[in-house]
Amino acid sequence: MKPKEIPHEILFCNAKTRDGTPCRNHPLKGKTRCKLHGGMSTGAKTPEGKERQRLAILKDGQYTREAQEKRKMFTDFHKACMALIMQMSVIEN
Ligand SMILES: [Zn+2]
């Protein structure tokens, strides 16, 4: 019987503890190790999965690189305009 066919609740983690005794936790479903010994997912591998992960944690996009660059561009433009207005007011007076 393969590890995936046996219910994970009756199995034990394959890892060995620092004492040298076997780990007594149950492995994660479909895995041979518990969450503390490498049973957890190591993250998305495919570009589609990575994109799905990126979109899942994105809230409003206010801090994306594009949004920050756009904000900086507007700020720089505003500063340049204000400097020009100040120069014109100095020349007029
Ligand atoms: Zn373990």
Image (cartoon, grey):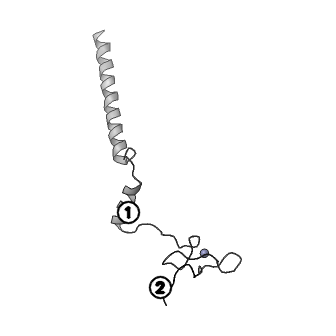
**Displayed quadrant of residue 68:** top left
- Is the C-beta of the residue carrying label 2 under 8 Å from the nearest atom of ligand 1? no
Q: Nearer the viewer, residue 55 or 29?
A: 29
Task: Please tell me the numbered disc located at residue 50.
Answer: 1
Q: How many marks?
A: 2
Decide: few, some or many residues near mark 1? Use Cα within 10 Å; few <14, some 14-19, many ≥20.
few
Residue at 30% from the left image edge and 26% from the top image edge: 81
Residue 47's place in the image compared with 73, above or below, is below
**Displayed quadrant of residue 83:** top left
Residue designated by label 2: 5
Q: Position of residue 75 (x, y in %)?
A: 35, 33
Which of the two discs, 1 and 2, sits closer to the camera? 2
**Displayed quadrant of residue 62:** top left
Residue 85's place in the image compared with 3, above or below, is above
Given the image, on which type of amino acid does mark 1 rest?
Lys
Q: Secondary structure at mark 2?
A: loop
Q: Secondary structure at mark 1?
A: helix
Given the image, on which type of amino acid does mark 2 rest?
Glu
N-terminal of the pair, mark 1 or mark 2, is 2
Q: Position of residue 58 (x, y in %)?
A: 39, 52
Q: Nearer the viewer, residue 82 or 57?
A: 57
Q: Position of residue 91 (x, y in %)?
A: 29, 13
Q: Nearer the viewer, residue 64 or 53?
A: 53
Q: Nearer the viewer, residue 17 or 56?
A: 56
Q: Position of residue 36 (x, y in %)?
A: 59, 70
Residue at 39% from the left image edge and 57% from the top image edge: 56
**Which residue lies most toward the bottom here?**
1
Residue 85's place in the image compared with 19, above or below, is above
Decide: few, some or many residues near mark 2? Use Cα within 10 Å; few <14, some 14-19, many ≥20.
few
Residue at 35% from the left image edge and 42% from the top image edge: 69
